[in-house]
Image (cartoon, coloured by chain):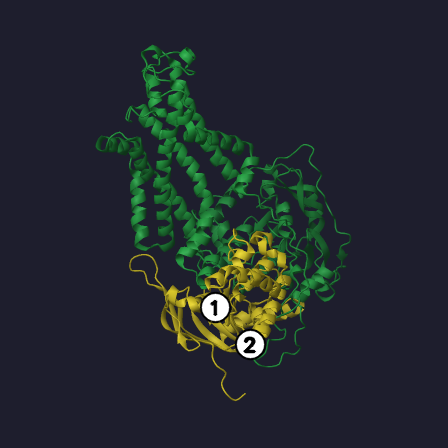
Amino acid sequence: MTSTPVSPAPATTPAKVSLTGRLLRNPTGLVSLVILLLVVLVALFGSFLAPKDPDAASLSTILAPPGTDGLLLGGDSAGRDVLSRLLVSTQISVAAGFVALIVALVLGTAGGLVAGYRGGWFDTVSSWLTSLLMALPGMIVLLAARAVLGPSVFTSMAIFGVLMAPAYYRLVYASVTSVRAELYVDAAKVSGLSDPRIVARHILRVVRAPVIIQSAIIMGIALAIQSGLEFLGLGDTETPTWGSMLNDGFANIYKEPILMLWPSLAIAITCTALVLLANAMRDELEQSRKPRRRRNAPAAVVERADTVATHPDDAHSPRGETLLSVRDLVVGYAQRDGSTKVVVHGIDLDVRRGEVHGLIGESGSGKTQTAFGVLGLLPAGGRVVGGSIVFDGTELTGLKESEVRKLRGVRMAYIPQEPMSNLDPSFTIGYQLTEPMRVTKGMSKAEAKEKALALLARVGIPDPERTYKAYPHEVSGGMAQRVLIAGAVSCEPDLLIADEPTTALDVTVQAEVLDLLRDLQAERDMGLLMVTHNFGVVADLCDRVSVMQHGRIVETGPVRGIFTDPRHEYTRALLEAVVLEDGDPRGELGATPAAAPAAGTTGDATDDNEEVHA
Amino acid sequence: MSEQPEVLLDARDVEVTYPIKGFGKKPFKALKGVSLDIRPGECVGLVGESGSGKTTLGRAILGLAPVTGGTIRYRGKEIQGLSRRQRRPLSAEIQVVFQDPYGSLNPSMTIEQILTEPLSVAGVPGAEARARVGTLLDRVGLPGDSAHRLPREFSGGQRQRIAIARALALRPSLIVCDEPVSALDLSTQARVLELLIEIQEQTGVAYLFVSHDLAVVRHISHRVAVMYRGEIVESGDGDQVTARPEHPYTQRLFMAAPLPDPDRQAARRAERLQLAAQA
């Protein structure tokens, strides 16, 4: 065993606040939880709190207004104490709601778990059953059930539970089928865990939160439906429930309208609290609240690089005029507390006409953020905080979105990393290629088609006519990337920005795509900004390189200078880390290693320059 | 060394066929009779492109893919087609490190829960299992206080170290490494490779190292096999296969990987284009 130097703990603090804790801090969550707690307390102890017998009729208090004879909320149509009935009915209404909830929860969750995890015939049968249940009109089933089984509120709620089971089934089924394919489930299988233990340990954890949220909603629906049934007079009129009280109040609406108020309030407040609680839980679980921008938020902290190691041009450097000039670019993201997290710390970058400029860095270095900042395509919350971006004489920062759109895709084009997710699966490739040309260049359909076919042939697609008519899923990843390249150059841009365009491709396909990019770039004298983490790609394609680390450019210069004379220690470390193909092989098994490894040389866990994505 | 070293894992003519949904569709043959052996303490590299079947072979050995033909012997005993219950003793022998360090750790479990899971299945008492977590974390170079953290608090490279620690928990004799460094940054990649080599030299565990990257495979493997469309097209000594490949496909693979040097890459590119023109 090696003795490893113990390095400082990973940067983030364990922010493990329980869901309940977070709900109590959320105002909506707190209020709805307090209301629901009150409802539950009343349900539990209401029969003890009731000042009178809820079923004791009295002729003297029939439809008595609130306050008469010590009846706080008055008397109903039979002279019974409304307050007592309200307290007692809470118990029955909530209990009946729980019956529906539990039946739906048990049936739906168990069915969804088994069907999703095991698949096979059970999956087929239960999916059929859920579809059937969802197609049944709930009210009519409940009416029929009452006719056959009698007016018990508990029976009808149990049946309603069965009808609501698909809500859980679908939810759990969807979660389980996605979790089942996760690698950690495979790892658990390799470790010898049995299926029930995998379900208990790995799968229930995932479905727990959505099931709790769903339960709050289902409970609300069950209470509403139950009250509806009772209100229609289909319940057992002897048992006090919110619905039957509502029915009684409605019958006497002209004589004593206030009778309607109490059960209505009980139903409305409880159901609203349940729905709001579900919303609050979802917000807290998904952190889906939008960050608020405070007026006096702290200014974004920009930490510019001290010095940028800059190499002079060499004989190979292209001498075209500057096409894109980025000065002191700062990109930041709004945080939940109103501050701005800076991911690009004031960088300078020039791309000349006819030049391939490599922007190289590891994950979290800000290279993609820089590219998106230039394109004006930063994801939600992100924005260019400062600096200037001048493209062919036009300042892009502060430009209206409609004006940026005139440039983007026309004079400034983009090639993404994932070709498949950047093609719309529901349109043919031909349509997706011709549409931009028709919009931006005003070409006719026939002209655009002719040009698209020529482009497809140019990017090396063997049968352009067939690919033109194909849908994205019908072509391979390499072909899809060629299609996107064809699309990017279709409007004859001056600048091409490619974000790891070959990372998702096989190495043989990568070589072909790089060849294509090089040829197109030379042919059209475009500027190409190539974002990548691969030094091989840089060496193959780029004229000049900028090395990024932690949102700063640390070294920039012609490609040969960077490779032969790296000046910044980060560049040197990166180049040393490249596992070389012509490096020393491991050798044969049993051969003495050239040098025995020194103890503790590799144990340092501070290796990761990448940031932890929480 | 005159006598033949013992073979740990011996795969002969392995076939894996996946049924394709839909009536009358032809089933998909992911492996078309693949043979491969791994000796104790050896690292066998398996190179190929996406869809070549290299991952499927690893999954077949792990019992995660349906073997429809051929045999896989582990220490002489056939292990293909065993039920999950029958395979359970093997979990202490054959382990796995997956490619995606994000998907291979359950996001809602702490590192301690992740690392003790295989131990508890193997019947190690809870207290002893928790005590072993510290040793495992130390082994892969993570601080001991990582145990009570969640995976999301770690970077990709650190997560991959946790996955390696999980694979080591039961002290297996063979670890199937399925692209273990492909999702990592360059500098992290090199360090995780060094860690794997160091562990192998100290514990004598054997690796089946699946990767698409010829350079990485060359760095870590004693022997290398190249897969193409469900078949092994070339295999042999690591240096020979990765530096002087004989099969045209391996040659194409070799020529396609760009070198991190502008001038040598330009020369290689010219050579590759010439080779392509001849073909």
Q: Which residue is mark 2?
A: B222
What residue is drawn where x is 52% and y is 38%?
A283
Q: Is residue B279 above or below residue A5?
A: below
Q: Amino acid at mark 1?
A: Ala
In the depicted view, which residue is nearer to us: B60 or B56? B60
Q: Amino acid at mark 2?
A: His
Q: Which mark is residue B92?
A: 1
Q: Colour of chain A?
A: green
Say whether residue A127 is visible: yes
Q: Which chain identifier belongs to the yellow chain?
A: B
Q: Are marks 2 and 1 on the same chain?
A: yes
In the depicted view, which residue is nearer to us: B192 or B129? B129
Say whether residue B270 is visible: no
Does residue A530 appear left or right of residue A459 in this picture?
Answer: right
Q: Position of residue B193 (x, y in %)?
A: 60, 67
Spatial distance from mark 2 to mark 1, Cα to Cα? 24 Å
Q: Position of residue A399 (x, y in %)?
A: 65, 38
- Please report, as a chain letter, where disc 2 is located: B
Q: Position of residue A10 (x, y in %)?
A: 64, 54
